[in-house]
Each structure stands twice: as structure tokens, then as C-alpha cells.
Amino acid sequence: MTTAIRKHSRGIPDLHIERNEDNCAILDYEIRMQSPLRITFRHIERSAALELRIQELVGRLEHFYDRIIGCHVVIESATRHPSGKPAFLVHVELTVPGGAINASSAPTDLHQHQNSYVAVRDAFEAAKRQLLDFAVA
């Protein structure tokens, strides 16, 4: 495996890029929390690609606020949309000094979160807003 490390200019943490035998890129954002990142999938199959996206978003939150102690992310298939497709709900729990931040993707329309990546994005945006409020308080 060959490894390259680069630093992004947009405030994203260090990115480690490795290539496997098939020359496929394996991306890994450096996460510096005291506790390891926990990702739980409920009523859906585990997805390595979704886990990678969550690692990236946690890395961005750490770059934004470097005192995060731990993070637990839960991705679940909440209910079924009338179309028969699953709707996703994502909870992000951040442990920070002196408290905890709980955020989730709260769809106003279940159609909005038929895509797990959209649900993850919305939950992390909510967590970032709460983290900003916590950091300036």
C-alpha cells in the first residue's frame, strides 16, 4: 500500500489516502477524540461508505471545535414512506467538556430523508449549530 497525507485549505482535517492492491482509494480522516467514534446501524445493513462519510464529518466537527471527547452516531430506518422506501433517522451525540450535545435529522417531510446521506448531513449540520452555540456560551 502506498500512503499520501495532505492538508486541505478549507479547514478540513488531515486526510490520509491509501491505495489497496486494486488501486482503490481508501480515505481516512484523522480523528483525535479521547474516546473512539461509535457508529450504530439499526434495522439497516452496515455501510462502509456511510461510515467513511461519518468519519469525515466528525473530523470536520473536531477541526471546528477541538475539545470533543467522544461521538456516537446512530443511523436507523425509522418508518417506511408510503412509497415503500425506508426513511432514515440519524442521531449524533457529542460528548464535550461539561456537557453533551444531542442532534438528529428531524425531517419535516419523510420524503426528505429517504436518502441516508441526506439524513446524516442534516444531523451533522444540527450538531454543528449546537456546537457553535456551546462554544460561544
Image (tube, helix red, strand yellow):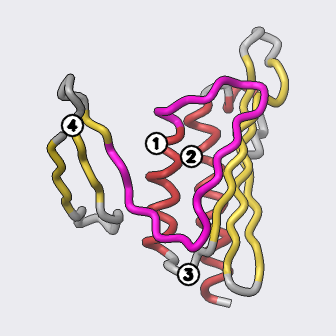
Type of residue at label 3?
Arg
Q: Earlier in the sequence, mark 3 or mark 1?
A: 1
Between the residue at mark 4 and the residue at mark 1, the CA separation in whole angstroms equals: 15 Å
Q: Earlier in the sequence, mark 3 or mark 4?
A: 4
| Residue projecting furthest to the bottom | 137
Residue that numbered label 1 is attached to = 52
Q: Nearer the viewer, mark 4 or mark 1?
A: 4
Q: x, y (%) of residue 61?
A: 51, 66
Residue 76 falls in image quadrant: top right
Type of residue at label 2?
Arg
Between the residue at mark 2 and the residue at mark 4, the CA separation in whole angstroms equals: 26 Å
The stretch in magenta equals: 27-50
- Element type where label 2 sits in the image: helix
Taking 48 as reference, is 11 above or below it?
below
Type of residue at label 1?
Leu
Between the residue at mark 3 and the residue at mark 1, the CA separation in whole angstroms equals: 21 Å
Residue shown at 24% from the left, 29% from the top:
24
**Between 21 and 28, which is closer to the camera in this rendering?**
21
Q: Find out whether residue 88 is within the magenta segment.
A: no
Badges 2 and 4: C-beta atoms under 8 Å apart? no
Residue shown at 76% from the left, 73% from the top:
100
Residue that numbered label 3 is attached to = 67
Q: How many marks?
A: 4
Residue 63 falls in image quadrant: bottom left
Residue 19 image label: 4
Q: Nearer the viewer, mark 2 or mark 1?
A: 1
Badges 2 and 1: C-beta atoms under 8 Å apart? no
Residue 121 image label: 2
